[in-house]
Image (tube, grey):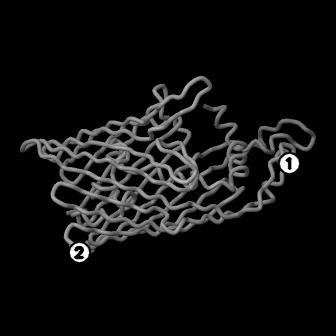
Amino acid sequence: MQKIKFLLPVLFLFTFIKAESQRVYSNEFLSIGVGARSLAMGNASIANINDVTAAYWNPAGLVEDSHKLDFGIMHSSYFSGIANYDYFGAGYKVDDNRNIGLTLLRFGVDDIQNTLELYDSDGNIDYNRIKKFSVADYAMLFSYSQKSKIEGLNYGANVKVIHRIIGSFASAWGFGFDIGAQYTRNNWKFGATLRDATSTFNSWSFNTEELEITVLDSTFNTIGEKKTEITRPKLLLGVARNFTIDDNFKLLAELDADFSFDGKRHSLISSNALNIDPHMGVELLYKDALFFRAGINNIQQIQSFDNTDWTLQPSIGLGIQIKNIVIDYALTNITKNATGEFSHVFSLNYFFR
């Protein structure tokens, strides 16, 4: 892992420089998800979500949060702690028909060794010339949710501000919008979120003094002329149903499908025009205080040299509510294969009635 971290400066610069004209997977850190509950359910949350994390999944669900003030936090680590992902959310109930929310996200790799100036002017290695920097993505979401005059129908929207940095080499600011809707009828719930509804535009600026280094020129890594990165709209649809087993047990099941249109992706249904990524999750509730969850996500077809394999990302989790505190845990395989590392994700919600 230390060797990987040592090479990260070159890898990040090469990936950024060579892929800046591509649109697939732009701002992909916003697709990771928030809340251990949703992650344990395979990210199947578009239709059923009704707490502070709804600001991220589907802003229409935020108005279903009955608490006057709701806070949520989450921390998770990836790749043996090299990358860290942090979330903070706050929701406020304005009145019986309106809620507002604030969401903060950060995904970053810190303490990366910058070895671009490892050699001095005489060609000697000087470890004192090694500096450290961070590569990080930040997002701030301002959310509004309201009940409509149609019974069971809610709608909401997000305004997104994005800031991305690659040390002192480059940085970007971006802006975008999400819109969402939820409809409840009897035990059925339906949801839709249009992320980056008008496309999200990241405007990059480059520190040419930092990037005009001999080692980059000698490896033919030149800075491109394009400075705008575009995230195309993505449509997320979900349907969920509640089942009452007895006085103590209830069951929630949801099936979602993500539709993207920004070029061919590694998804179950994949093409240059349309990609469909289905995922599903279930939650067993005991006395509305203890929760057992499971889900399936990232179903992909992987082509190897001799055959085609199918992979998926399983997840399980637990949750418990003690008075005004909800503690959730998820165990999920972020590397999407049977031998990959599993990540432990914890999240905490605290609310005021």
Image position of 261 (left or right of 69):
right
Image position of 148 (left or right of 307):
left
First in sequence: mark 2 or mark 1? 2
What residue is disc 1 on?
Answer: 217
Check disc 1 and give the amino acid type: Asp
Q: Position of residue 57 (x, y in %)?
A: 38, 57
Q: Residue at x 59, y 28 (%)?
A: 304
Q: Residue furthest right?
A: 122
> In this view of the protein, which residue sits in the foreground, 214 or 181?
181
Dot 2 and dot 1 residues touching (CB under 8 Å): no
Is 189 placed above or below 153 here?
above
Q: Residue at x 70, y 44 (%)?
A: 9
Q: Quadrant of the C terminus?
A: bottom left
State the CA–CA distance, disc 2 to disc 1: 59 Å
Q: Position of residue 260 (x, y in %)?
A: 50, 54
> In this view of the protein, which residue sits in the foreground, 64 or 10?
64
Q: Residue at x 60, y 62 (%)?
A: 230
What residue is disc 2 on?
Answer: 95
Q: Residue at x 83, y 54 (%)?
A: 212
Image position of 241 (left or right of 275):
left
